[in-house]
Amino acid sequence: MTTSLILGFLWVILATAIALMPRRIHWPGAVGLIATGIPLLGYITWENGPLVGGVALVAGASILRWPLFRLASWLRRLAGSRAR
């Protein structure tokens, strides 16, 4: 198993630990996970190829689905205000 995949699995364990903490920790934890997850995703893709990178992207998106939902709603609101 490559170093990048081991780091990816540790990232998933850290995300699970953050999810088990009180709610006030969730959003700061999500910011930290995003900040570390984006370069880690690039490293996984570079070391293991685009198929494994795509699987890691889907796994990370399923873990961080609420920040993604919030980002999508913010972008919709932003696009709606510019269309007027």
Image: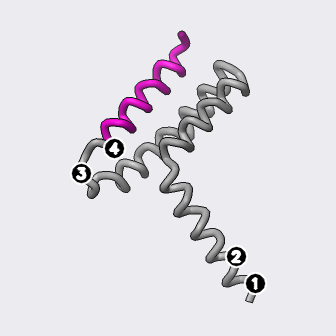
Secondary structure found at label 4: helix
Looking at the picture, does residue 6 appear above or below residue 60?
above
Residue that carries the numbered disc 4 in the rendered image: 19
Q: Quadrant of residue 69?
A: bottom right
Q: Looking at the image, is mark 3 or mark 2 nearer the viewer? A: 3
Residue pictured at 34% horizontal, 44% vertical: 19
User: Distance of mark 1 from mark 2, alpha carbons?
Assistant: 6 Å
Secondary structure found at label 3: loop
Q: Marks 1 and 2: CB-CB under 8 Å?
A: yes
Give the amino acid at mark 4: Ala
Secondary structure found at label 2: helix
Q: Looking at the image, is mark 4 or mark 1 nearer the viewer? A: 4
| Position in image of residue 57 (x %, y %) | 61, 37
| Position in image of residue 12 (x %, y %) | 43, 31
Q: How many residues crowd around disc 3 within 10 Å: few (fewer than 14), some, or many (20 or more)?
A: few
Let me know if residue 13 is in the magenta part. yes
